[in-house]
Image: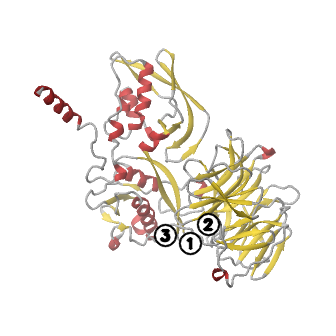
C-alpha cells in the first residue's frame, strides 16, 4: 500500500507541471499576454503510424496552439513547410468540424462550412458557404507529414478556438477637426506578442475606406526598431522602440503617434504606461511615458442622451428614452424648449444634439424641410428618392437620393445655420449609376457614413461604411471607397449608428424567414437582437458605454428590452428621434 501511495504521489507530482492548478496568470505577465497553457497541453502531437487523414485532422485540431513556444501544429508539417508557414496570414473561421476524405495518394480533402475570415491585418469579414481544400502529404522516415497547403492557407479555427487564440482589439485613427479617436476593431493573436501585434498594426496604413477621412502619425518609413514591444513585469511599462527618417523633428507626427500607440496599448490589461523611443532616447522628451492620466490630445466620443423626441401625428413630445416605457419628461425639464408641429406629409425626422434644428423629408421623398428658431423652409428642388436626413457633429445636414428624372445616385450636404443654404454635392465616384441609396447616416464622430445601397435592377441591398473625405477647412468633398459592413445580410431595410464601433440594422440573412433587428459590430460578429413581428425599424439609444435598442412595428408601436424578457411594448408613436443623429 505504501508503495502504491508513493507511486500515486509521484504521478500527481509529475502531472503538476503539465496542467495548471491555479487559474491566476503567471506572476509578472499581463492577463492579455498569458500563454494558452490550458489549450496547448491538451494538443496531441503526431502519433506513430498515423494515416494521412489522421495527420490532417491532428494538424487542424492543433491550429489553436499556433502561438505557443512548443507549437504542436508544426510537428505535423515537413520542416520546409513548418518554417514557411505564416499562420496569421489568412484565418478561416469555421462553423463545424471539418469533414476529411482521402482523395488520392498523399492527398486529403477537407470540407467545412465557413463563418468568417480574418486577413493578415486582423480584419474580420463574415462569410457563408462551404470551403473545400486539399492538403498534400509525403512520407518522412516512414511517417506521413503535410508537404503543401492549399493556396493562401493560414489557420482553420472554430469560433470557440478563435476566442482562445485571438483577442478582438481596438486600434485608433484621429479626427483632427474635433479631437476624437476613430476606432477600428482588429483580431490579433493572444500570447506574449500581443503588445507587439497591436503596435505593429497601429503603425500600418490607414484602411482604404478611411483614406482622406482620418489622420495617423504612421507612415511607410516608420516601423518598430526591434521585433518586440516588451512590457516590464514590475512597472507594467510597454516600451515601443521606433525608427523612421525625420520622425524626431516632426512634432505633429510624434504627438499623433503618442496618442494612437498610447491609447491602443493602454487598452490592454497589464499595460500601465507606454514609452516611445527613437534611437535609444525618449521620443517624448520631458513628457515621459504616457499613462491613463495623460492628456493625449484626443478622446473617445462617449454618447449618452437623456431626452428624445416622440412624434405622434403632427406633434412632438420630449421623452426619456432610457426607461423601458419611454416616459414623458417632467415639465421642469422641458420648460423653454420650443418644438414645431409637423404635417403628416413629412417623415424621417432628424434633430441636432441641442434640439435647435429639425429636418425631415416629404413622404414622396422629393422635398427637404428644415426648422430653426420658429422658422421653417422647404427645399423643393434637391432631388428625388431622398433618404431620411442625418446631422453630423459639425452641424452639417446630409441627405442622399438621385437627380430629378432618374439620374445616378447622389449625396448632398447642407452647411451653415441659414435655412436657405444650398445643398452641395459630395463626390461618390465608386457608386454604380444603376444603384440607389436608400439610407444614409453620419457616424457620431463625423468621419464616416453608412449607406444602404440597393443594387441595380433590385438585386438586394448592401450595408456599406465609407470615410468622409474633407478638405483643409474641414468641408466634405467625397466619400472614400467603402467596406461592406454585413456581407451575410441579403436584405437591408434600414440602418443607424449605435456607437462609434457598431450599427443597428433591420434586414435578413439567407436563412431568415422574415426581417430581423441586428447589431452590426464593425469588425465583429453579426448579432440577432430577437424577432419582433411587424418590424419596421430599429433605433439605438446611446447609454455612454453602449446602447439600448428600440424597435418600431407597423402597428405604430415602439418596443424596448428589459433584461432577458425580450421585447416589451413601450408606447404608441410614429417616430422616435434621437438628438444628434
Question: Crowding at label 3, few (<14), some or many (≥20) Cα neighbours within 10 Å?
Answer: some
* Whether residue 300 is situated above or below residue 436 in the rendered picture: below
The residue under label 1 is 178
Q: Secondary structure at mark 1?
A: loop
The answer to whether 297 appears left or right of 562 in the picture is left
Q: Secondary structure at mark 3?
A: loop
* Whether residue 222 is situated above or below residue 166 in the rendered picture: below
State the separation of the CA atoms marked 3 and 1: 8 Å
Q: Secondary structure at mark 2?
A: loop
Q: Are marks 2 and 1 in contact (CB under 8 Å)?
A: yes
The residue under label 3 is 298
Task: Spot the residue most to the right.
Answer: 405
Q: Earlier in the sequence, mark 2 or mark 1?
A: 1
Query: For the point 31% across and 36% down, which residue is it?
Result: 70
Q: Earlier in the sequence, mark 3 or mark 1?
A: 1
Query: For the point 28% across and 41% down, which residue is it?
Result: 20
The residue under label 2 is 446
Which quadrant is home to the N terminus? top left
The answer to whether 575 appears left or right of 209 in the picture is right
* Whether residue 51 is situated above or below residue 481 in the rendered picture: above
Percent across and percent down for residue 290 are 37, 67
Where residue 18 sits, quadrant-wise, is top left
Where residue 328 sits, quadrant-wise, is bottom right
Which quadrant is home to the C terminus? bottom right
Question: Crowding at label 2, few (<14), some or many (≥20) Cα neighbours within 10 Å?
Answer: many
State the separation of the CA atoms marked 2 and 1: 9 Å
Question: Crowding at label 1, few (<14), some or many (≥20) Cα neighbours within 10 Å?
Answer: some
Amino acid at each position: 500500500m505504501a508503495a502504491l501511495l508513493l507511486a500515486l504521489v509521484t504521478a500527481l507530482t509529475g502531472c503538476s507541471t503539465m496542467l495548471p492548478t491555479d487559474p491566476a496568470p503567471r506572476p509578472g505577465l499581463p492577463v492579455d499576454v498569458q500563454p494558452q497553457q490550458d489549450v496547448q497541453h491538451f494538443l496531441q502531437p503526431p502519433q506513430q503510424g498515423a494515416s494521412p487523414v489522421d495527420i490532417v485532422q491532428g494538424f487542424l485540431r492543433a491550429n489553436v496552439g499556433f502561438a505557443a513556444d512548443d507549437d504542436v501544429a508544426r510537428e505535423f508539417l515537413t520542416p520546409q513547410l513548418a518554417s514557411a508557414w505564416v499562420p496569421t496570414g489568412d484565418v478561416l473561421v469555421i462553423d463545424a468540424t471539418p469533414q476529411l476524405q482521402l482523395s488520392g495518394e498523399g492527398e486529403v480533402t477537407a470540407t467545412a462550412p465557413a463563418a468568417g475570415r480574418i486577413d493578415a491585418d486582423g480584419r474580420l469579414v463574415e462569410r457563408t458557404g462551404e470551403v473545400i481544400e486539399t492538403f498534400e502529404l509525403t512520407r518522412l522516415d516512414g511517417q506521413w507529414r503535410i508537404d503543401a497547403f492549399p493556396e493562401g492557407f493560414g489557420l482553420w479555427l472554430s469560433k470557440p478556438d478563435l476566442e482562445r487564440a485571438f483577442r478582438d482589439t481596438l486600434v485608433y485613427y484621429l479626427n483632427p477637426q474635433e479631437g476624437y479617436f476613430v476606432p477600428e476593431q482588429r483580431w490579433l493573436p493572444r500570447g506574449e506578442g500581443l503588445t507587439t501585434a497591436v503596435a505593429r498594426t497601429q503603425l500600418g496604413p490607414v484602411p482604404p475606406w478611411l483614406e482622406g477621412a482620418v489622420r495617423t502619425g504612421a507612415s511607410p518609413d516608420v516601423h518598430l526598431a526591434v521585433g518586440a514591444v516588451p512590457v516590464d513585469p514590475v512597472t507594467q511599462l510597454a516600451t515601443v522602440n521606433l525608427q523612421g527618417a525625420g520622425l524626431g523633428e516632426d512634432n505633429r507626427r510624434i504627438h499623433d503617434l503618442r496618442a494612437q500607440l498610447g491609447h491602443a496599448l493602454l487598452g490592454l490589461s497589464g499595460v500601465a504606461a507606454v514609452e516611445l523611443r527613437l534611437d535609444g532616447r525618449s521620443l517624448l522628451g520631458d513628457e515621459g511615458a504616457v499613462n491613463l492620466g495623460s492628456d493625449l490630445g484626443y478622446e473617445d466620443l462617449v454618447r449618452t442622451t437623456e431626452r428624445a423626441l416622440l412624434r405622434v401625428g403632427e406633434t412632438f413630445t420630449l421623452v426619456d428614452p432610457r426607461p423601458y416605457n419611454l416616459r414623458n419628461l417632467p415639465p421642469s425639464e422641458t420648460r423653454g424648449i420650443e418644438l414645431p408641429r409637423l404635417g403628416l406629409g413629412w417623415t424621417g425626422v432628424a434633430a441636432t444634439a441641442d434640439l435647435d434644428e429639425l429636418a425631415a423629408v416629404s413622404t414622396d421623398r422629393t422635398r427637404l424641410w428644415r426648422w430653426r428658431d420658429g422658422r421653417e423652409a422647404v427645399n423643393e428642388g434637391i432631388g428625388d428618392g431622398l433618404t431620411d436626413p442625418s446631422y453630423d457633429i459639425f452641424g452639417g445636414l446630409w441627405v442622399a437620393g438621385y437627380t430629378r428624372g432618374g439620374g445616378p445616385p447622389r449625396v448632398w450636404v447642407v452647411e451653415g445655420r441659414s435655412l436657405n443654404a444650398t445643398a452641395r454635392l459630395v463626390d461618390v465616384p465608386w457608386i454604380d449609376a444603376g444603384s440607389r441609396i436608400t439610407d444614409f447616416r453620419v457616424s457620431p464622430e463625423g468621419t464616416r457614413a453608412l449607406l444602404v445601397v440597393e443594387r441595380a435592377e433590385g438585386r438586394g441591398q448592401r450595408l456599406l461604411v465609407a470615410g468622409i473625405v474633407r478638405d483643409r477647412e474641414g468641408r466634405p468633398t467625397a466619400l472614400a471607397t467603402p467596406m461592406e459592413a454585413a456581407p451575410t445580410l441579403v436584405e437591408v431595410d434600414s440602418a443607424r449608428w449605435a456607437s462609434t464601433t457598431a450599427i443597428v440594422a433591420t434586414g435578413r440573412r439567407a436563412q431568415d424567414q422574415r426581417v430581423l433587428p441586428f447589431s452590426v459590430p464593425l469588425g465583429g460578429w453579426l448579432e440577432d437582437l430577437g424577432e419582433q413581428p411587424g418590424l419596421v425599424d430599429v433605433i439605438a439609444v446611446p447609454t455612454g458605454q453602449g446602447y439600448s435598442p428600440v424597435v418600431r412595428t407597423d402597428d405604430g408601436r415602439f418596443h424596448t428590452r428589459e433584461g432577458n424578457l425580450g421585447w416589451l411594448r413601450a408606447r404608441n408613436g410614429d417616430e422616435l428621434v434621437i438628438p444628434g443623429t
